[in-house]
Amino acid sequence: DGGITQSPKYLFRKEGQNVTLSCEQNLNHDAMYWYRQDPGQGLRLIYYSQIVNDFQKGDIAEGYSVSREKKESFPLTVTSAQKNPTAFYLCASSMGGAGGAGELFFGEGSRLTVL
Amino acid sequence: QKEVEQNSGPLSVPEGAIASLNCTYSDRGSQSFFWYRQYSGKSPELIMFIYSNGDKEDGRFTAQLNKASQYVSLLIRDSQPSDSATYLCAVKVNYQLIWGAGTKLIIKP
């Protein structure tokens, strides 16, 4: 079955540590996205990529980094520079770039907690 | 600043009744409009999208768009307990999707 796989589902981090969240898709989608969701807030775009080896910052990129070495993969690293990283992280993909027609397919999410 | 506003709720609706969810947006250049459903602890999934003024129906769901008044709504007919979720409105402006914070809907049996 086609879909998006995020791992890990739950992650605990000590302050000062970098962590990497995995996102893999087998939908053959060109565009991939990372969003952050906090309680009571809408989804906020961290980074997006429309093509391999290219990515753009979203609204809240500070303290995060990404890579897009393969079409299928778009890992997100939460660095120690991100001061408030506890959140629900969602990876998504779409057929067209820049949100395509707006139909995003989401992974199951990764919940990061800083201890 | 582009904004999408939704009443956070919770909106409580009896089973079998019509649930009405509303969303307003600030950017008149908005091109297309989306409703996503998100169950607690899960990821969002697309329910409907609408581009043109008027109504669009899909089963028990109807999306309504009024560009002059800058609002989009989602009606759920014959509400079921399984419809209890948070409904996110997303608006596409140029190449960006702008998200509302969502309305929590509770369907009471």
Image (cartoon, rainbow, N blue to C red):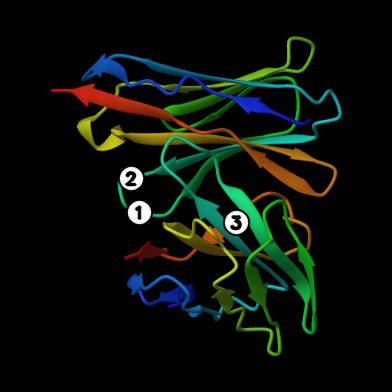
Q: Quadrant of the C terminus of chain B?
A: top left
- Residue that numbered label 2 is attached to: B39
Residue A53 in the image: above or below residue A41: below
Between circles 1 and 3, the one closer to the viewer is: 1
The local crowd at label 1, few if under 14, some if 14 to 19, many if 20 or more residues have their Cα within 10 Å, is some
Could you tell me which secondary element the residue under label 1 belongs to?
Answer: loop
Element assignment for label 2:
loop
Residue at which label 1 appears: B42
What secondary structure is found at the residue carrying circle 3? loop
Q: Is residue A95 left or right of residue A73?
A: right
Residue type marked 3: Leu
Question: Crowding near pointer 2: few (<14 within 10 Å), some, many (20+)?
Answer: some
Q: Is residue A73 left or right of residue A10?
A: right
**Circle 1 chain:** B
Q: Position of residue B59 (x, y in %)?
A: 44, 33
Horizontal arrangement in the rendering, residue B48 relative to residue B108 (left or right): right
Query: In the picture shown, does residue B43 fall above or below B75?
Result: below
Label 3 marks a residue whose chain is A
Tell me if I can see residue B80 in this picture.
yes
Amino acid type of the residue that numbered disc 1 sits on in the rendered structure: Lys
Q: Residue furthest bottom?
A: A69
Task: Tell me: residue B56, above or below residue B38.
Answer: above
* Residue B56 position within the rendered picture, expressed as x and y whole percent measured from the top left: 60, 27
Amino acid type for the residue under numbered disc 2: Tyr
In the rendered image, residue A59, in percent from the top left (x then y), is placed at 71, 51
Determine which residue is flagged by label 3: A104
